[in-house]
Image (spheres, rainbow, N blue to C red):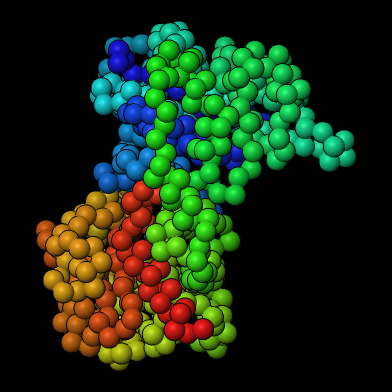
Amino acid sequence: MPKTKYIFVTGGVTSSLGKGIISASLANLLQARGLKTTIQKFDPYINVDPGTLNPYEHGECFVTDDGAETDLDLGHYERFLNVRTSQANNVTTGRIYQSVIEKERRGEFLGKTVQVIPHITNEIKERMQLLGSTGDYDVVITEIGGTVGDIESLPYIEAVRQLRWELGRDNCIVIHLTLVPYLSAAAELKTKPTQHSVKTLMESGINADVLVCRTEHELLDEIRNKLALFCNVKREAVIQSIDADTIYDVPLLMLEEGLDRVVLDLLSLPDNLEPDLTKWKAFLSRYKNPKHHIRVGLVGKYVELQDSYKSILEAFIHAGAVNEVKVDVVSIHSEHLTPKNCTSKLKGLHGLLVAPGFGSRGIEGKITAIQYVRENNIPFFGICLGMQMAVIEYARNVIGLKDANSTEISEDTSHPVISLMDEQKEVENKGGTMRLGAWDCKLTPNSRVHEIYQKDAISERHRHRYELNNAYLDQLSSHGLKATGINPETGLAEIVEIDAHPWFVGVQYHPEYKSTVLAPHPLFSSFVQACSQYAKTNK
Ligand code: GLN
């Protein structure tokens, strides 16, 4: 392989067309043909990373092993490719400007006026080629966030235009994802928005090589021919992306449409091997043919927006497929849960997951829900804030420490069972300062988690400031809530569990980030199995 090939994916007409899924699906097909492929995302907003964004703004913040707080599309990349991403895979305008301004302060521009072209575009181009320059990849797919024509996307589009000249057309192509809307009054699919969007791209000097058209109805030949004619692309490079039952169908739909073939041809890459999708298809078949359904409650405070808990929902899909059950996730708003309505709201559930989160809103609802499932022997899984709330609930209702709390919620509680580590007390900035990324954890022999992971030591990703206060470990343990995973470096408790309960596990880390289609997370698989068991015995 002579050198890395670059594929850029831009979006037109509207946002939310699913550039991330198209990029991940194409990457999946190229990977299944034996090409080493990675995906990166360039976001045009000015936040240095999405770590400071409210989930309502931008959905979940995905965390990588190296501790980067990134766009949720990186989660899709990992789930589709089963390979790890890193800070280099997600760049924002804020990060680009921060770096250019730091260089300017160091005098690196030697007295020149610092401008969008060439300084900002050079920084963008350098980062666009960073992963490619490692020599680790045959293909780098870059998703450009936002919609073509937005003011903030312009420097990225300009950088792509320049790169196409520098690298040559058979090393660098552009896929444009657009919408072909159906007007029911006219009973017709309309190509005009796509034509305009392609024209907007052309005004920036870029001719799209491939059009991927999101549509609710089949694109007939006539429409495909028209799009090819008006938009300067080959007829076979007009790809239909019709609404699918599941995002995991998209690679197969793209294969049927020949997206991978068109791309290989444009990039002068050999097209002699069929993609091997055996395992992917096996997953789909298990996922689509469940033997039974289970209902799992997801208690959180951002439940109005599904994207807030993206990785958790996807991890349930992977774990469901392993167990051949369909997991129906029932969203429960923690703010609306009270001791009075708890029984009616949680009735009929076969398991409960209490989600991660920040701040005090909805906290008491989470604690109430945990008490209910603990006392009623319903499988419980607490993640990060969910684990912290399980510790508080236990301290209050089993040990009898009535005002036990986290210092995040109540700074002057007399029983700070969850508290801030000393290093965190000095922290002033909010961005990038939590305990982030992969940390090691030693598992206690003979514990439930040891049995689940089948390992003595694990590494999982974190994103939090507060910790289980070690001063309470002995008391918790003697009352039955045991710390069964400890960070060997800091001695911090990462896992708690109750022996005398069918399945009660709280983890300080985020297992959902590491669940992929081909490697479902063992904790999710085991939790779903316990919920299925509960469903069988509690019909
Ligand atoms: N707010 C809690 C902390 O910072 C939990 C964070 C989370 O759930 N990700 O420790």
The answer to whether residue 204 is above or below residue 357 is: above
At which x and y percent is residue 172? 44, 16
Q: Which of 129 and 263 is in front in this view?
A: 263
The residue that appears at 40% across and 68% down in the rendered structure is 528
In the rendered image, is residue 277 in sight? yes
Residue 410: image quadrant is: bottom left
Horizontal arrangement in the rendering, residue 488 relative to residue 316 (left or right):
left
The residue that appears at 54% across and 26% down in the rendered structure is 258
At which x and y percent is residue 168? 43, 8
The answer to whether residue 404 is above or below residue 36 is: below
In the rendered image, is residue 162 in sight? no
Q: How many labels does the image show?
A: 0
Q: In which quarter of the image is the N terminus?
A: top left
The residue that appears at 36% across and 48% down in the rendered structure is 518
Quarter of the displayed picture in which ligand 1 can be seen: bottom left
Horizontal arrangement in the rendering, residue 301 relative to residue 180 (left or right):
left
Residue 176: image quadrant is: top right
Q: Which of 23 and 272 is in front in this view?
A: 272
Q: Which of 465 and 85 is in front in this view?
A: 85
At which x and y percent is residue 372? 44, 85
The residue that appears at 23% across and 85% down in the rendered structure is 480
The answer to whether residue 405 is above or below residue 169 is: below
Q: Nearer the viewer, residue 235 or 464?
A: 235
